[in-house]
Amino acid sequence: MGDAAVSALVTEVVGRLTSELIKEFNLLWGLEDDISSLKDDFEQIQAVLQDAEEKRVKNNAVEVWLKRLRSASLKVENVLDDISTEALLQRLYKERGFKHRVRAFFSSDHNQLMFRVRVAHRVRVLRRKLDAVASHRSRLGLSHSDVSRVDVGVVVEMPDRETSSLIHDSSVIFGRDEEMEKVTRTICDKDLGKHEDGKIRVYGIWGMGGLGKTTLAQLVYNHERVTKCFELRCWVYVSQNFQVKDTVKRIIESIDGRGCTLTTLDTLQDSLRSKLTGKKFLVVLDDVWIEDGEKSKWDQLSEILSCGAEGSMVVTTTRFQTTSRMMAKVPELQHELGCLSEKDSWLLFKKFAFAKGREWDNISELEPIGMEIVKKCQGLPLAVKTLGSLMWSKSSSNDWKRVKDNHIWELQESKVLPALKLSYDTLLPHLKRCFAYCCLFPKGYEMEKDVLISVWASNGLIPPRGENDLYVLGEEILNCLVWRSFFQVGRFSNEYKMHDLMHDLAEDVMGDDCLVIQPGREARITNEVLHVSSSCPDEKFQFSSEDLEKLTSLKSIFMFGYKYQRDIRQICNHMYQRVLYLCEIGLSALPESICKLKHLRYLNLSGSRIEVLPKSIMYLQNLQYLILSYSDIKVLPESIVYLQNLQVLILCGCFELCKFPEGLRYMSSLQHLDLKDTFNLMHLPLGVQELTSLKWLPWFPVGNESGAKIGELGGLNLLKRLGITKLENVGGLSEAKSANLKCKSNLSVLRLEWNEFHMNEHDEEVLEGLEPNPCLTELVISRYMGKNISPSWMVNLNNLVRIHVSGCLNCECIPALGRLPSLRSIKLQFMTSLKCFHDDNTNKSGDTTTMFPSLQNLDIGFCPCLETLPSNLPKLKVLRLRNCYELVSLPDEIQSFKDLNELVITDCKHLSERYEKEKGVDWPKISHIPNIRIDPPPR
């Protein structure tokens, strides 16, 4: 049985037993005595659970008892699912007349009286079973703990924001300077050239998991010398099941910064060669697993990559010396990464264990104990960081000694690092379950924040806390798991990854709760399985209908990365499923039998070939999340409006979608409706004003003769993110003001977009009327055709952090932004008439006000008429300029921009000549900047 916190499961069941919905139903059907008895048993068991989970490792009888408790808890949970769904249907039937269609469906094969009889029988059977489990606890000698003191909330103490950012900070990397210098010097060696056979050179970094191979490669990849040496750099995570086609595709995507739609190896390799030929490039292949019999695959990829200029290089990280030897060939290009010294391990540990945010008055007492703990980590940076984060939360010497003397250090047979397991054991129960659940994602998979929080919430893994939004509570859990080093932040701030060793830990603690099917790995199916995940190609997917029938309590199915051609009706027989993740697997249709999944809460069909949803989807009355992004969906059935619990509907990138159900107004529970890039959807139906729960509406097309007008936004005051497009359909100032943006104090992100490239007579007053609340933090203005962007309200946006202005072809100067105290980022694109910044963005004589006091990022592209830049940017860190043909020089003050770390100049003729490396007349003014990329001037 898995170790993913039985106590959290019990806590969730107790909470549901006392919910208002269950109480209402039990009172109606006379089940209150039986349910109350179940609750009493669970509460008695709760009192000894902490002791039981501590003793399970050494006491087999306790392990068996916990297994019986888990089994009973899951069966109770299934009954509660049935009761909750029936109670929900009855409530909807009473509240809404059109719900008779839902009742009619269920009444065809469902008799209310028989349902009551069956549920009463199941509850009584479970009550007897749980009575036996509860009475057996006394024979195990389990000690009581004060349940009232157990923290079942989400709040977890963490260091301040500055310290937690150390997770990504090079200042917490110790003992790798010499190795970084060696690798950097070697791969930048201009005399290295290609192999004698013309193949590209490879530098291999190898060593056991947890040593920091990826971290070393990242340090090299971002080194100033490397960024200047290579014209092109790209990073690809490879991992197990190495495939040439997949790797080529990922390299292309890394270069382009977007998805690649090519599907055949021939077209992929032609595309990649066209991007690499003649260029000096660096490709990092991270976490490579190539078996001895797969050398031909590497030879094929190596041939494709050998088209670059002299000095091009591939850097690989791998756990295996044989893989490194096969790819790098010569010993001089192979580097074995060793463990950290005790000194460096101690420095790394201290950085986390004694981080800011806590007062330490006994450090001298704790340090000797900490040094003993560090020795047990055996020089593995991942283990040191994880335990350092753990010890920060423990302030007494007794707590530190308990970690040092923990029995887990003596367990040698486990494939999981003792340090990681020990840190896991100290997590709160709900954090354990959230972490462990993520083993369902493949190794190396970049998990989106919204997806993680949604699947956690759908499985009841986020315990409620008062009136707090579950999404906010989910963010707290993520932040905690990142701080404790269980997760790493991915390429983007909204993506997370797990280290392979952490993934092994998650899978280990899930035990029989989880079945992960991978290529070349035998699947062991037991009746205990709750969650199934497969990343197998279709032809290797060994999972029959008979196998599925064994899984009577299946809660989740995840399928990744293959074309699933089978009939998925077998999946629809598992009525207790809560999560169905069928993302990008080529599914072309959903069966009508999807309606059997009456407890389904999360359905992800993004990237599928589905064009039409079955009408029976209306019967999924527990569905809260429906993800259809980048699918081939053309029309949503009108029946979808009957999904009264639907909170999140994602349709972004559904290019074929042309019509939205007229009954949109009935979807009163919607909080997040994402319609970005649904270019064929001309307007939304009337009734948007009824969706008063909406928090995210990133794409709202203003209707013209038909459809919802901008005034329907007036009462939606919970909005946090809003995008308004087709603003040319707004008639003037008063109509713009009817959107009531000024009163939306929750609004943090606003996008204002016109869809026509010509000036309308009302454009200026429309922009004036769309005054946002001063709380706004991000503003995007796109395709506004006025000469000046100068609404009176712009100077009042004191909380504005980011502004992006794009496609405003007639605009000659940008708004007055210099005095906005919080502004950190300005991005200007396709402003073909822009000549200068607003006069108020520069200091006038006698004015001592610092302009742009917080600006860190200035990104200007395709502004061919721009002549000048602001002169005083004291906090600027990144300056990027592209296609600014009339820009003759950078401000002389750039020499005093102490924080400027990156300068990129692309296709700016005058600047390329003036600041050419070592040759340009003004090169000395910028030579101090660490990272400089300037296109060579045309000859």
Image: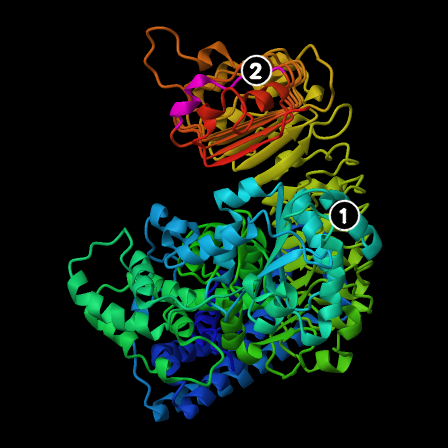
| Residue 889 among magenta residues | yes
- 287 above or below 74? above
Q: Few, some or many C-alpha atoms within 10 Å of disc 2 (few <14, some 14-19, many ≥20)?
A: some
Name the secondary structure under disc 2: loop
Relative to the observer, which residue lies in front, 160 or 82?
A: 160
Instruction: From the top left corner, tell me how far across and down residue 793 is, in percent.
Output: 49, 17
Instruction: Give, as a single range, the part of the protein colored magenta.
Output: 886-897
Tell me which numbered mark, 1 or 2, is placed earlier along the sequence: 1
Which residue occupies 62% across, 37% down?
Answer: 698
- 731 above or below 97? above
Q: Amino acid at mark 2?
A: Val
Instruction: From the top left corner, tell me how far across and down residue 76 is, in percent.
Output: 54, 76
Residue 707 appears left or right of 206: right
Mark 1, residue position = 273
Mark 1 → mark 2, Cα distance in angstroms: 35 Å
Residue 621 visible from this viewpoint: no
Residue reaching furthest top? 845
| Residue 371 among magenta residues | no
Mark 2, residue position = 888
Residue 257 visible from this viewpoint: yes
Relative to the observer, which residue lies in front, 262 or 592?
A: 262
Relative to the observer, which residue lies in front, 267 or 690?
A: 267
Which residue occupies 71% across, 33% down?
Answer: 686
